[in-house]
Amino acid sequence: MTRQQLTEQIFKKRSYLCVGLDTDPEKIPSHLKGHPDAMFEFNKAIIDATHDLCVAYKINIAFYEAHGVKGWDILERTLRYIPEGIFTIADAKRGDIGNTSAQYARAFFETIPFDSITVAPYMGEDSVKPFLGHPGKWAIVLGLTSNPGAEDFELQQYADGDLLYEKVLKTVSRWGDTGNTMFVIGATQASSFRRIREITPEHFYLVPGVGAQGGSLQEVSDIALIKDCGLLVNASRAIIFASGKEDFASEARVVARKYQQEMAIYLGKV
């Protein structure tokens, strides 16, 4: 999916919501747990309930590969069930030497045809570049994450004054362009968004951490929205596990609609 196509969907739906399909079999409603295809049935119901309110789905690969061959089958069927025109993200955080990254790109762009994949940049340019050579596909590179461990490396300071994550943003933005490279920026790091927009003024950001992790949609939007939006704000648990009962899909829709309606207000200001 091109940037123009993504932007068109955002303004058509008045939404920059990304729904995270972090489907944990232990957390799905009890009435589904005896179903032979419980994870897929759960995913289908969530997608049916939310696809008109969001512009992206982020599938966390770990929740599927933990189940071996069956999990990969559920992953592929879930991806193919997502309606055409919705941006798809393989949340895989891959990052390895060049020839290995090339195979990861082939796996997630061709064999399992996602629009994008999350990438760890810490092995350098040759580990990221293979993801940038596929037209219409995106590398979503870890920038400043929402977890407490961001303090361990990402927020460490170089001698020149730059923080490590700032060095990552400056360097990676030269490898690709604003049509094939996004950055993961955690919503719980909202105080840093102004500086991040200065470094990468035109890039899209995938923003986790809103909802269950406590990030503020308003704060992120006020600082980081640009003329063609430039944001995909992800909510996972807050939406897909909004209810543990048979009404889980309808309750997921209620939460997703609240996000969409709030986003429509902020989009109206750009």
Image (spheres, rainbow, N blue to C red):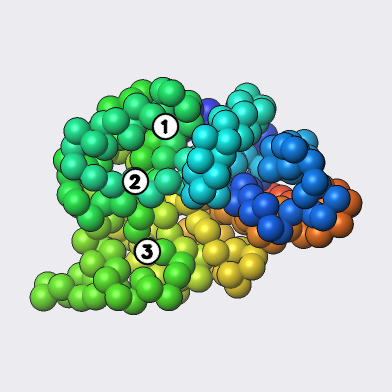
Label annotation for residue 31: none
| Residue occupied by mark 2 | 94
Q: Is residue 72 rendered to the left or right of residue 43?
A: left
Q: Residue at the location (77% across, 59% down)? A: 242
Instruction: Please indicate, yes or no, whether residue 252 appears anywhere in the rendered image.
Output: no
Could you tell me the amino acid type at mark 2?
Answer: Arg
Q: Nearer the viewer, residue 162 or 73?
A: 73
90 sits to left or right of 94: right
- Disc with the residue nearer the chain's start (2 vs 1): 2
Q: Is residue 83 above or below residue 51?
A: above
In this orientation, which residue lies closer to the viewer: 196 or 94? 94
Pointer 3: what residue? 144
Q: Is residue 69 left or right of residue 217?
A: left
> Dots 3 and 1: beta carbons under 8 Å?
no
Residue at (56, 53) in percent of width and height? 233
| Residue extending farthest right | 246
Of circles 3 and 1, the one toward us is 1
What's the amino acid at mark 3?
A: Leu
What secondary structure is found at the residue carrying circle 2? strand
Up-down relation of residue 40 to residue 247 (above or below) = above
Q: Are marks 2 and 1 in contact (CB under 8 Å)?
A: yes
Of residue 118 and residue 233, the one placed in the foreground of this image is 118
Q: Is residue 180 above or below residue 23?
A: above
x and y, in percent, of residue 215 in the image: 57, 69
- In primary-sequence order, the first of circles 3 and 2 is 2
Q: CA distance from mark 2 to mark 1?
A: 10 Å
Instruction: Name the secondary structure under disc 1.
Output: helix
Q: Nearest the camera: 221 or 213?
A: 213
Picture residue at 75% right of the left edge, 38% below the top: 36
Q: Is residue 220 left or right of residue 132?
A: right
